């Protein structure tokens, strides 16, 4: 692959990831429904995970395992394994958080009878 | 050396033990209480010698306790008045609730005041200062009356003062790297001018608050009148003197070395004078004895501040002598009010009249202290007043002396109001049952009256320690030059010789007294206060002849324009405004999770935008 | 060697997962085991701390991968001090909540203790770890257990508070991960010591952005204004002991993280003044908000936030004196604010709204609790001779020595505000008449014991601060010595 | 010892002189007032007759200890004032106590009696007494201000606070202080109106309609002592003014002339003026008299 094209693609991936993050942030900040807020947060996390994986990618790298492709490959480049490990952990954590969030949403709905975040403001000032 | 540790251990242990002894036995508690005030007092005066100091260290800070003649003088005020007030308190607290609480705070107050005067370093000074503040605060709220306003006001003002002082302390420390007062004084000369000006100001704020100087006095009337009277005598008599103690220290050791120090002195002296005048006016207005005395305390401290702010030897002597006298007479007066409160249940002039025949000893003590307070010869107050005027006149404070004189003359009004309101006037049936207060309460009052009387003619007794103290602070010896045992001089050589005056007064008084009652006293009969002629008519039994409402109205009408403005109101408005602002500010926390998230985003964005400025 | 730092993470985590299983054997075990674990850790941490103070930090390598490749735990004077403090508070909280509510049945108790152990694991892990991603994981563990604990009571608005906490927490984790990745992309390592040794090679822009993201992310947990929207709600709605745990454990861990980043990892000097700015903002806003609160725990929450602001200010001086002051303040804050939360929650135990007016006249019914609350209030506003005074004094001394007179004055002014609202409450407890429909609840013996321990500590530190200042001095010296940290960690070879 | 005896003798003589002169002045005042008001009036010795009548009466009732002590208190002030003020300049006959006190002492001893008296009056329980007392005290606050201002002006100009010192100043320079310090003199004289409590400042006693003030519940010996105290006090105050502003007097005749002239100022001003209410009186004193007091102080500061 051409180097400049790769660069472009790389930036494209970064851009997409950041865009996804921003979309998630938008959802979390603007949408009034609690569910949409939770979805927004999840989307934001996904975008971040994408970004992290992209950061760890090297041109022409293979999967960071001693696979056949790596051992037989000519340039012996593999992508950085650490970000992938991190992303795995982050995904797990994100999953946990989302689960907690959703359970809280259920409790909030039972308690308030609504999912509108503007109406759930018993605690303020 | 060890005496200090023992004294403070007894105070602390005594306070705790006394508190818990109340659960066992009331009399045991009283005895423990007396013991934990009197024993350290005895130890202090017998065991502590001048010049010996006790160094120790805490949290890596070197501390030092010791006394010189100057602090000994204030220790005398604190412990002397403290002991008498403690004896008084036994009688006063009999049958009252929260006895343990009272005793605990009383002992701690005495301890902290002694601690203040023995502290030779700023940290233990501050610690004891704060202990004094909160123990007195706990006393102010003892009655539970109006505590959210009066109590908090007292504490807030004290805290403002204390924190100003703390700021001064740490600034000094950042320069000298020690907390010793000695080192602060040494280093002061080498500081930048800005610091030389600010450090005394910061300290003086603290002391001015405690000494209830205008415009920081607004806590005083409420606090003095809300605290139990047995404590207020100490509060007004000794605790407020701590402000004077510090003020003198700062003025003499720091301000006097500053060329611009003259402005400090002038401002302080004028503030003192205004305090005296305004305090007096408000005292005249009060219908409650506690409030009256509270404002009167403010006014009296104004004189003291003026005296010490003038800073001449005579002024210092006057201020400190007045401080001692104020401890005596205001202590006695608050005790008298306490006695009346205990026996009648009220302290309002409009309710009580004609107690003179029921509480003669209390009356005698009040009379003596009122004479001393008004500064009338031959009692001790006169000596202080005289020296104050002379020092003002000889140091070119012409308008100030007029102001002080005005305050002092107007003071007669409340003096008379106090005596008339409680003791004189119609003897109402309502108060027929009233008895004299128990001996534990009367004896301290009478003792202090005797002191006042003796000091009126032989002021040298107390001027000697004052002079010693002033010499420790760097003044020249003024014996034979400004005072002798019973002669007082001014700087121009004019003098008052007190002994012949006293004897003449006594002789004239007795001569005419005998003339009036000669062959008469046995022959005359006592008639009730109903048996009087009002314009030739004999009033009926049920006719109300009590005159106590609107007592000083004519005078108040004359000064009405001055009284319309109250500093207190401005403070209240300010506090309200602040709380309104805070109320508005806390609405930042809208309660909406999205808003909070938005804050986060905005915060990140702003910090990122200004990252070059910030980092 | 008396034990290894890894036990601090492993044992409570293990206990947390064993609790439900043990509960099947004997229900009481659910309550007992956490206490035993914490007691053991307490002994261990004191031993280790003594050891560390004498012979230098212990660096524990996990799974045999030497730094910078593996994860390592560092038990130095600084982190050891904080760990000991946290474990101690955990112990107190456990003691207090051993029988916090009789009507709390087995199931909730199980969850409660499980989450509490998780919380302590996470917080201790944050302090001990030497790896930034590992720290992220521990922060998330703390966070998730924190969300759970906040939402503990089903009857109240706790779910709302928890949701706010969660929402901000998620944003925090995103920012944190982003920051970690920026650093990683520049240096290719996650080990703190190694990052610290190489940080000067990083492009300043990336460095600053990364630091800002770190501060923002951790600031959410450390309750920095304006990132602390969740905090008052969470404190107010969580059970009392959890409030104490938040104030004493979670926030401390987050502040530790910020400090570790600024002092050790990054070399940006502007960060110190930034700390002062945000610290002051937090202090002022929180204290002014606190004065207008009508709910007790919310007031305490704001006060706690303000105190942490002051801690950041003290750290921001950047001097060893400042660090000493900040650590001392953290210690006192942990003890005193915990005492306030613990006693305060009994004062408003049975009331529905937890209003301040409902503490009126409580001293007749709860004399010891009221006394301890008053003691705590006096101590936290810095009145001598109680513990709070010494830390306040050291903060102010540090400020003056750094010539930050403006900061000094502001801190003192804010202290006056603090004084007002605490005294108002204390006055109410002692001098107001009890409301008609307020039903006071006597504290259990355990709770009383826990509070008395804290109260006694306040007095001990107040009268004789030297018992603790030696340790704090060493801890602050340890934090200031960046090269030693790097060497200690990187010299480990396995 | 002998010296003390001589002193006591001198004091007694001074007292008798003061008593006679004061009583006579009082009688003359009554006569003059009557004349101005177009009445015949009592003879000038009427006051002596009154005094002796009162003194010979037997006291039948009293209201308590303070009531008994009140007149004696009042007398203390009068006599002490008299003893502190040098009666004749440069005369060894009546040195009395005037080397033992100074002006500030004098100012304070002058308030001793009225307050003691007020206490006695208070114990009678007559509301009119107390009303009179508060009015008197209020008025005192009024006139003391210009009075003290004028005294302070003298003190700072001549660097002395003793009366003899001021008299020496006049003797040396040969001019009376009323000429060299005119503003101080004006202020002092205006203050004197209040001090003597003649109309328009006579609301304290309100003598013409109902008995108020300290005297209202006293008769017989009590009233006699109070009356004589008043007379002695009048003389003492006038002497003080003469000493301060008119160079003192070297013999009794000159003293009598000077005091009488001075005395006529408030008396004549009084008979032609209606009465002020208390607050009006107080404000009056804080108006022009205080203004002159200020001028006096300014003059003193400039000239000192």
Image (cartoon, rainbow, N blue to C red):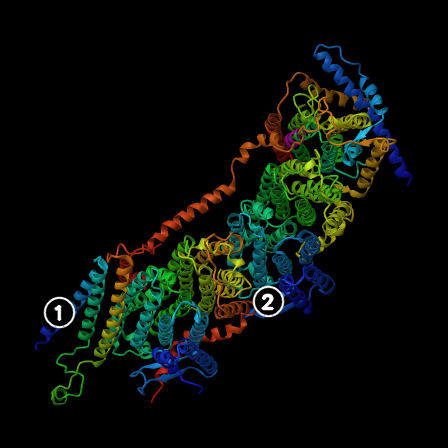
Residue on which the image places disc 1: A12
User: Looking at the magenta stretch, what is its main secondary structure?
Assistant: helix
Q: Distance between the residues labelled 2 and 1?
A: 68 Å
The C terminus of chain B - image quarter: bottom left
Q: Which mark is residue B81?
A: none
Q: Does D77 sit left or right of B97 as displayed? A: right
- The span shown in magenta is D135-145
Check if residue D140 falls in the magenta segment: yes
Q: Can residue B1 be seen in this view?
A: no
Q: Which chain carries label 1?
A: A
Residue on which the image places disc 2: B63
Q: Give x and y (percent) for residue B149.
A: 51, 48
Q: Mark 2 lies on which chain?
A: B
Q: Measured along the vertical axis of the image, is residue C346 above or below residue C107?
A: above
Which sits in the foreground, C431 or D29?
C431
Which sits in the foreground, C265 or D164?
C265
Which sits in the foreground, A59 or B425?
B425
């Amino acid at each position: 692959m051409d180097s400049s094209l790769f660069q472009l693609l790389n930036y494209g991936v970064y851009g997409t990831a950041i865009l996804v993050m921003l979309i998630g942030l938008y959802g979390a900040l603007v949408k009034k429904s609690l569910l949409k807020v939770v979805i927004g947060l999840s989307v934001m996390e996904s975008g971040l995970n994408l970004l992290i994986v992209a950061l760890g990618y090297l041109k022409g790298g293979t999967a960071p395992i001693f696979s056949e492709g790596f051992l037989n490959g000519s340039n012996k480049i593999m992508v950085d394994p650490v970000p992938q490990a991190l992303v795995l952990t982050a995904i797990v954590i994100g999953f946990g958080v989302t689960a907690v969030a959703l359970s809280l949403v259920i409790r909030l709905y039972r308690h308030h009878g609504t999912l509108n975040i503007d109406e759930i403001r018993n605690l303020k000032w | 050396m060890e005496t200090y540790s023992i004294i403070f251990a007894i105070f602390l242990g005594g306070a705790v033990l006394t508190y818990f002894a109340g659960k066992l036995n009331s009399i045991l508690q009283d005895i423990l209480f007396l013991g934990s005030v009197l024993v350290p007092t005895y130890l202090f005066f017998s065991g502590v010698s001048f010049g010996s100091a006790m160094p120790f260290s805490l949290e890596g800070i070197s501390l030092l306790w010791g006394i010189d003649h100057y602090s000994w003088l204030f220790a005398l005020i604190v412990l002397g008045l403290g002991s008498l007030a403690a004896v008084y308190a036994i009688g006063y607290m009999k049958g009252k609730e929260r006895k343990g609480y009272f005793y605990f705070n009383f002992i701690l107050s005495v301890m902290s005041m002694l601690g203040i005067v023995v502290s030779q370093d700023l940290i233990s000074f501050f610690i004891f200062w704060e202990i004094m503040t909160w123990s007195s605060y706990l006393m102010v709220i003892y009655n539970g009356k109006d505590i959210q306003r009066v109590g908090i006001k007292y504490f807030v003002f004290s805290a403002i003062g204390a924190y100003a002082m703390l700021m001064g302390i740490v600034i000094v420390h950042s320069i000298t790297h020690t907390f010793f007062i000695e080192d602060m004084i040494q280093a002061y000369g080498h500081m930048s001018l800005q610091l030389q000006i600010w450090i005394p100001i910061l300290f003086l704020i603290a002391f001015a608050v405690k000494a209830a100087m205008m415009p920081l006095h607004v806590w005083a009337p409420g606090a003095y009148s809300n605290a139990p009277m047995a404590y207020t005598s100490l509060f007004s008599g000794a605790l407020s003197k701590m402000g004077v103690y510090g003020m003198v220290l700062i003025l003499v050791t720091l301000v006097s070395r500053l060329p611009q120090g003259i402005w400090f002195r002038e401002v302080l002296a004028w503030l003192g004078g205004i305090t005296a005048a305004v305090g007096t006016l408000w005292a005249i207005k009060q219908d409650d004895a506690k409030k009256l005395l509270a404002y009167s305390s403010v006014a009296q401290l104004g004189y003291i501040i003026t005296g010490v702010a003038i800073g001449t030897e005579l002024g210092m002597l006057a201020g400190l002598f007045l401080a001692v006298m104020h401890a005596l007479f205001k202590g006695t007066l608050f005790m008298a009010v306490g006695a009346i409160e205990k026996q009648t249940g009220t302290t309002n002039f409009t309710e009580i009249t004609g107690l003179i025949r029921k509480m003669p000893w209390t009356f005698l003590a009040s009379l003596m202290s009122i004479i001393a307070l008004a500064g009338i010869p031959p009692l001790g107050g006169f000596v202080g007043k005289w020296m104050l005027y002379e020092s003002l006149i000889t140091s070119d404070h012409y308008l100030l002396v007029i102001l002080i004189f005005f305050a002092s003359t107007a003071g007669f009004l409340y003096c008379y109001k106090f005596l008339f309101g409680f003791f004189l006037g119609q003897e109402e049936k309502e108060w027929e049952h009233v008895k004299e207060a128990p001996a534990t309460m009367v004896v301290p009052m009478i003792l202090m009256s005797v002191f006042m009387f003796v000091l009126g003619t032989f002021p040298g007794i107390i001027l000697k320690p004052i002079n010693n103290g002033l010499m420790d602070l760097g003044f020249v010896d003024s014996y034979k030059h400004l005072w002798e045992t019973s002669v007082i001089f001014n700087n121009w050589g004019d003098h008052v010789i007190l002994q012949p005056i006293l004897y003449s007064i006594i002789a004239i008084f007795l001569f005419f007294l005998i003339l009036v009652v000669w062959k008469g006293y046995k022959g005359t009969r006592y008639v009730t206060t109903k048996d009087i002629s009002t314009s030739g008519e004999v009033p009926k039994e049920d006719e109300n002849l009590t005159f106590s409402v609107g007592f000083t109205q004519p005078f108040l009408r004359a000064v009405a324009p001055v009284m319309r403005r109250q500093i207190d109101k401005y403070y209240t408005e300010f506090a309200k405004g602040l709380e309104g602002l805070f109320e508005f500010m806390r609405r930042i926390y809208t309660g909406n999770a999205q808003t909070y998230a938005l804050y986060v985003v905005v915060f990140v964005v702003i910090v990122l935008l200004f990252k070059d400025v910030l980092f | 060697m008396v034990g290894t730092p890894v036990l601090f993470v492993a044992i409570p985590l293990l206990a947390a997962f064993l609790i439900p299983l043990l509960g099947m054997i004997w229900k009481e075990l659910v309550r007992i085991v956490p206490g035993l674990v914490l007691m053991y850790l307490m002994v261990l941490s004191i031993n280790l701390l003594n050891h560390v103070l004498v012979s230098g930090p212990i660096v524990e390598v996990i799974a045999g991968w030497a730094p910078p490749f593996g994860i390592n735990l560092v038990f130095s004077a600084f982190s050891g001090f904080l760990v000991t403090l946290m474990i101690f508070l955990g112990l107190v909280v456990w003691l207090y909540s051993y029988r916090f509510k009789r009507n709390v049945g087995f199931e909730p108790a199980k969850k409660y203790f499980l989450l509490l152990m998780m919380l302590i694991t996470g917080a201790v892990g944050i302090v001990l770890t030497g790896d930034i991603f590992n720290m992220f994981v521990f922060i998330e563990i703390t966070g998730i257990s924190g969300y759970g604990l906040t939402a503990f009571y089903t009857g109240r608005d706790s779910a709302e508070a928890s949701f706010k906490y969660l929402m901000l927490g998620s944003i925090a984790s995103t920012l944190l991960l982003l920051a970690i990745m920026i650093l990683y992309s520049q240096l290719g390592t996650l080990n703190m010591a190694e990052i610290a040794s190489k940080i000067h090679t990083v492009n300043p822009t990336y460095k600053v952005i990364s630091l800002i993201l770190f501060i923002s992310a951790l600031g959410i947990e450390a309750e920095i204004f304006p990132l602390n929207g969740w905090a008052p709600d969470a404190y107010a709605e969580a059970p009392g002991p959890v409030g104490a745990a938040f104030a004493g454990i979670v926030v401390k861990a987050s502040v530790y993280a910020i400090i570790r980043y600024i002092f050790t990892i990054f070399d940006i000097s502007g960060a110190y003044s930034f700390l002062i700015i945000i610290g002051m903002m937090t202090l002022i806003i929180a204290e002014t908000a606190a004065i207008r609160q009508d709910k007790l725990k919310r007031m305490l929450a704001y006060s706690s936030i303000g105190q942490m602001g002051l801690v950041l200010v003290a750290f921001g001086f950047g001097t060893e004196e400042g660090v000493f002051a900040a650590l001392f303040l953290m210690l006192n804050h942990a003890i005193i604010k915990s005492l306030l939360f613990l006693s305060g929650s009994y004062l408003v135990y049975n009331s529905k709204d937890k209003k301040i007016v409902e503490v009126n006249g409580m001293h007749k019914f709860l004399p010891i609790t009221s006394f301890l609350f008053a003691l705590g209030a006096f101590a936290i506003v810095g009145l001598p001779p109680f513990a709070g005074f010494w830390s306040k004094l050291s903060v102010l001394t540090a400020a003056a020595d750094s010539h930050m007179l403006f900061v000094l004055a502001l801190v003192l002014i804010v202290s006056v505000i603090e004084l007002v609202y605490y005294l108002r409450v204390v006055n109410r407890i002692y001098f107001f008449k009890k409301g008609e429909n307020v039903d006071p609840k006597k504290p259990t013996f355990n709770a009383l014991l826990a509070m008395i321990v804290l109260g006694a500590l306040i007095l001990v530190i107040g009268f004789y601060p030297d018992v603790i200042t030696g340790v704090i001095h060493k801890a602050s010296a340890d934090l200031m010595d960046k090269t030693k940290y790097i060497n200690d960690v990187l010299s480990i070879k396995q | 010892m002998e010296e003390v005896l001589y002193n006591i003798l001198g004091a007694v003589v001074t007292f008798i002189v003061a008593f006679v002169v004061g009583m006579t002045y009082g009688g003359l005042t009554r006569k003059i007032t009557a004349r101005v008001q177009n009445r015949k009036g009592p003879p000038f010795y009427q006051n002596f007759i009154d005094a002796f009548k009162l003194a010979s009466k037997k006291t039948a009732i009293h209201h308590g200890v303070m009531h008994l002590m009140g007149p004696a208190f009042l007398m203390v002030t009068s006599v002490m004032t008299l003893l502190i003020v040098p009666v004749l300049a440069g005369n060894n006959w009546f040195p009395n106590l005037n080397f033992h006190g100074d002006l500030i002492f004098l100012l304070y001893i002058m308030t001793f009696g009225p307050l003691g008296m007020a206490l006695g009056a208070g114990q009678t329980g007559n509301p009119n007494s107390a009303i009179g007392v508060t009015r008197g005290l209020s008025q005192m606050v009024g006139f003391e201000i210009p009075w003290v201002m004028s005294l302070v002006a003298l003190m700072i100009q001549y660097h002395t606070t003793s009366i003899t010192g001021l008299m020496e100043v006049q003797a040396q320079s040969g001019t009376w202080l009323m000429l060299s310090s005119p503003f101080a003199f004006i202020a002092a004289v205006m203050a004197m109106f209040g001090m003597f409590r003649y109309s328009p400042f006579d609301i304290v006693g309100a003598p013409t309609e109902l008995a108020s003030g300290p005297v209202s519940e006293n008769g017989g010996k009590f009233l006699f002592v109070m009356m004589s105290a008043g007379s002695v006090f009048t003389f003492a105050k006038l002497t003080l003014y003469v000493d301060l502003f008119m160079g003192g007097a070297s013999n009794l005749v000159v003293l009598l002339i000077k005091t009488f002239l001075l005395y006529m100022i408030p008396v004549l001003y009084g008979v032609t003026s209606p009465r002020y209410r208390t607050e009006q009186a107080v404000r009056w004193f804080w108006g022009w008299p205080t203004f002159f007091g200020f001028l006096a102080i300014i003059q003193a500061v400039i000239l000192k």
